[in-house]
Amino acid sequence: MANVTSYNPYDNSELESFKVHTLKEIDTILKIADKRFYSWRETSFEHRKKMMLAAAKELKDNAQAYAEKMTLEIGKPISQSIAEVEKCAWVCEYYAEEAESQLKNALIKTDAQKSYVSYEPMGVVLAVMPWNYPFWQVFRFAAPALMAGNIGVLKHASNVFGSALNIEKVFKRAGFPDGCFTTLLIGSDKVENIIKNPIVKAVTLTGSGPAGAAVAKTAGENIKKSVLELGGNNSLIVLKDCDIHKTVKTCVQARFQNTGQSCIAGKRLLLDNSISEEFMKELIKQVRELKSGDPLDKNTYIGTMARIDLAEELKQLVDSSIKDGATLEIGGKSQGAYFEPTILSGVTPEMAVFSQETFGPVLAVTTFDTVDEAIDLSNNSKYGLGVSLFTKDIDTAEKLAFRFDEGAVFINEMVKSDPRLPFGGIKESGYGRELSSHGIQEFMNRKTVYINKG
């Protein structure tokens, strides 16, 4: 693979051609990153803070340009692309302000004169990232990693190489020295050997289950730390005492923002049978009102999917489920990379849209009669990323939280990532955590220091 060409999924026009890095260039990039680590880790938090705040300013000042590239590459509606860039500025600001306190020595009382745990950076960390949130997925790793004194090397998805280079540009314009954060323009076939390289001390991946398994296998064989954020099949559980209008609005956003291409999207709607008729009527009404069209139009809410083959795969899942007895309430058609916002009702656990991750604008609706049944349906998944529960009975909802096999439980809200809260899943949704103090400490050496008088 000598060159990679990117295409606009909205009109299939050619965007840009990129020359991939050779093995020699990869080796040079890694050596520069390794050398940079030994000087970067010596810098103060205050020094890093100034640069990270400059990165946040760069993102804000040029949000439109960075967002347009993102929209052209994956068909993401421009308003949502701008919001993504702005969220990246937030995570930069958050870690600029919080990293020092999150990594301060933890004093522990023992029989020593003094004993504590210090948090020290590991070195060069490889990030293997997906296309669906081409900026956010990277920045939620990069901001804490760089503030902690680590070095970032990015292998991004090949259809968003333009955004990958823009991320590198953000850090360069913010004043980070060469080698602190570098983009590798490579295919997935080069990842295994890069993980094996002694320079790389750890790896983080956001992506599919097979990709995560491959990365974890190589990292494990080489005794290297890995963090995996993989797929999700989140449920939206609607109890009979919810506020129907507000709940529908939140569920529509949870399923259809980013054209449904999100690991934390609410893909399975579990609906109390006693309110199903009224709820479905309002749901279909609100979904019909979603504007599809040119992703560069600020009023567009549903853009195209990132690639034509992804729309074709989604169509197969929908058609298969309809064949198995699901009812098509709205949508179901595709043209090129565009897929209509779609709702299927009467979905059972045996159907593809229930058991598999539908990575696109398709909502599968299943009814239940009891809360216990709803919890069992929700947990009936190989994934465990997050769940949303909608009810006015907050006390009861909070007591139910521990019964969900998930990395997160959101009550009366869609599952979302927030720099202040740890993010990650269990089961086949992966392991490890990003964001908050938990995320920044993932790629640190927790060093025990024990001191007695000589």
Image (tube, helix red, strand yellow):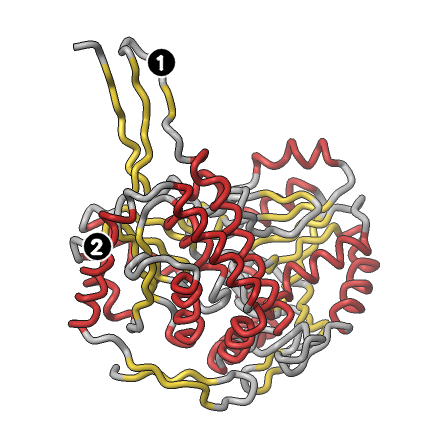
The amino acid sitting under disc 1 is Lys
Q: Is residue 41 visible?
A: yes
The residue singled out by tag 2 in the image is 34
Mark earlier in primary sequence (1, 2):
2
What is the number of callouts on the image? 2
Q: Position of residue 224 (x, y in %)?
A: 23, 47
> Left or right: where does residue 230 sit relative to residue 344?
left
Q: Decide: few, some or many residues near mark 2? Use Cα within 10 Å; few <14, some 14-19, many ≥20.
A: many
The residue at 51%/59% (across/down) is 263
The residue at 35%/61% (across/down) is 128
Q: Secondary structure at mark 1?
A: loop
Q: Position of residue 19 (x, y in %)?
A: 29, 81
Splitting the image into 4 quarters, where does residue 322 fall? Answer: bottom right
Asked whether 400 or 98 is in front, the reply is 98
Asked whether 311 or 271 is in front, the reply is 311
The residue at 65%/31% (across/down) is 399
Question: As drawn, which residue projects farthest toward the right?
Answer: 278
Q: Is residue 253 above or below residue 412?
A: below
Work out which quarter of the rendered image holds the C terminus and state it.
top left
The numbered dot on residue 332 is: none
Pointer 1 with pointer 2, Cβ within 8 A = no
The residue singled out by tag 1 in the image is 109
Of badges 1 and 2, the one in the foreground is 2
> Left or right: where does residue 179 sit relative to residue 237?
left
Q: Position of residue 80 (x, y in %)?
A: 62, 67
Q: Is residue 77 above or below residue 439?
A: below
> Left or right: where does residue 159 sit relative to residue 385?
left
Q: Secondary structure at mark 2?
A: helix
Work out which quarter of the rendered image holds the N terminus and state it.
bottom left
The amino acid sitting under disc 2 is Asp
> Disc 1 and disc 2: Cα gap in Å?
36 Å
